[in-house]
Amino acid sequence: MPDTPAIEVHHLTKQYATGKHAVDDVSFDIPRGETFALLGPNGAGKTTTVEILEGYRTRTDGDVRVLGHDPARTSRSHNARIGIVLQTSAESPNVTVAEQLRHFTTLYPRHRSVEELLEKTGLERQRNIRISRLSGGQRRRVDVALGIIGRPEVLFLDEPTTGFDPEARRRFWDLIDEVKREGTTILLTTHYLDEAAHLADRAAVIADGRLLDIAPIDEIGGAEARTPRVRWRDDVGEPHERRTNEPTALIRSTPEPMHDLEVIRPSLEDVYLGMVGHR
Amino acid sequence: MSTATTNTTTANAATIGAHRIGYELRSYFRAPDAVFFTFLFPIVMLALFSVAFSSAPDIQAGPNVSVDYATYYLPGLVATGILLSGTQSLGVDIAGERSDGTLKRLGGTPLPVVSYFIGKIGMVLVATVVQTALLLAIASLVFGVDLPTDGGAWAHFAGIMLLGVATSCVLGIAISALPREGRRATATIVPIVLVLQFISGVYLPFTQLPDWLQNVASVFPLRWMASGMRSVFLPDAFASAEPGGAWRLGLGALVLTAWLVVGAVACLLTFRWNRKDA
């Protein structure tokens, strides 16, 4: 069992009644314990893919398995093994944070304690405040607390930190790092490439429903896209740019003076924009 | 093995359902608009009618049999309270939960659907019992309504109430699928319930309505809940003011049970945690 991937996606296709392909022949596996980021522009098919894996949407074609289970079939025991943080948390019930968490603990056989969740998500001081009166960021933390409440083996995080300030995002990352250390498999979609770079082991880039690349986070886009660029101006002010994996050697071997010398290593963001932008 | 699993699952569903009753009651009583428009509404209406007609002559049902307006309106308002707490508040509540993502979230948890329904129906039952007790207490203590003293009347009362709550609840769950979005739930569901109140003999004496309207109303449950409650709270002579000059409790029970069954089947066929995509 531990050898089978936590999530298996084979030739997944989702076509809407309008004929539009939201997801077009996407395949990937996520081994147990890995944090996998799904990157792509708005409307690329990220949420559709994740919601098919969560069991909210049906697929048109292909095969998917989560912990060996077909999520299209509703199963309580399966739901007890996964955790879901949806993209939108519109719900604002008239119950306090502690009441909400306490109620949800009754649904899961191996649940965490309310105290642990409040401490982990930094909501101790909001425990007796009604969720409808929390700020957006605090509500999101309640969502995350509900996502990890049952010690899930697989955790889905669909744009979890949208609307967070930088400090809140850092604290969220620390929390997810902790969940990772417990061996949880995590599927994350995000618009923040620094978030993907910090949290994910591997990433896939999708656009228009198609998988463009899938690789460890520091290899995404291929070696070619990551080749450093050396830029300078010569004596008469003419700009030069060369791509090389040996910038030092290039600079040493250039006899004439180099002004405004820059060595640019493409960030994940540059690589990503290069992939998605040139379509 | 499989039997044991089934047993623990069933026990769990009941326990979780019991938890949900408390959770639902908490959020219900913390929403002031719901409390006013469903929970307190019959009490406000009783006060309004009692005060408005306080100097009007009593309503006669034959020689030496008469009741004041508070007594006359009480049974219809008890029935209305059941329909409001069941059909109206549940319908609006569940439609709202469907559109604000609550049901979607619950659908991703191990919560059994049956526990969700136990929570909702339990909440309505508790709310209705408290609401009706309050209504009867105010009717008796403030407006001097004489409540029945014999056990048979109260046994009828309990039976009509239970059947009424059950029917109202399944209809509320079924009707919650009608509004396309949560914001329109109140605008879709309240008018239906309001029209039923006017044609079912709650505010207007039933036999004063044209025959065809009485027939239309007799298809729906509220008319039978109201006449059933009149049989409990009004003197027997008032049966002469009913269609056909009799309470016809058996026929009423039959109509309510039919709606209960139709509503339950509709719930089973239509209830979804979230709107399935195309």
Image: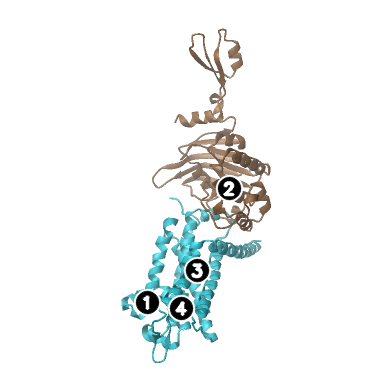
Chain colours: A brown, B cyan
Dot 4 crowding, Cα within 10 Å, few <14, some 14–19, many 20+: many
**Does A100 appear above or below B172?**
above
Please tell me if label 4 and label 1 are on a single chain.
yes
Q: Quadrant of residue A181?
A: top right
Q: Do we see residue B86 in this rendering?
A: no
Measure the C-alpha gap from mark 3 to mark 2: 32 Å
Chain bearing tag 3 is B
Q: Earlier in the sequence, mark 3 or mark 4?
A: 3
Q: Quadrant of residue B252?
A: bottom left
Q: Earlier in the sequence, mark 3 or mark 1?
A: 3
Between residue B250 and residue B37, name the one nearer to us: B37
Discs 4, 1 touching: Cβ within 8 Å: no
**Does A82 appear above or below A279?**
below
Discs 4, 2 touching: Cβ within 8 Å: no
Q: Which residue is mark 1?
A: B204
Please give the name of the residue rendered at 55% of the width and 50% of the height, measured from the top-left corner: A71
Question: Tag 1's secondary structure?
Answer: loop
Q: Which residue is mark 2?
A: A138
Chain bearing tag 4 is B
Q: Quadrant of the C terminus of chain A?
A: top left
Between residue B11 and residue B53, name the one nearer to us: B53
Left or right of A18 on screen, residue B6? right
Q: Which residue is mark 3?
A: B39
Which amino acid is tagged 2? Answer: Gln
Measure the C-alpha gap from mark 1 to mark 2: 51 Å
Chain bearing tag 2 is A
Q: Which residue is mark 4?
A: B74
Measure the C-alpha gap from mark 4 to mark 2: 47 Å
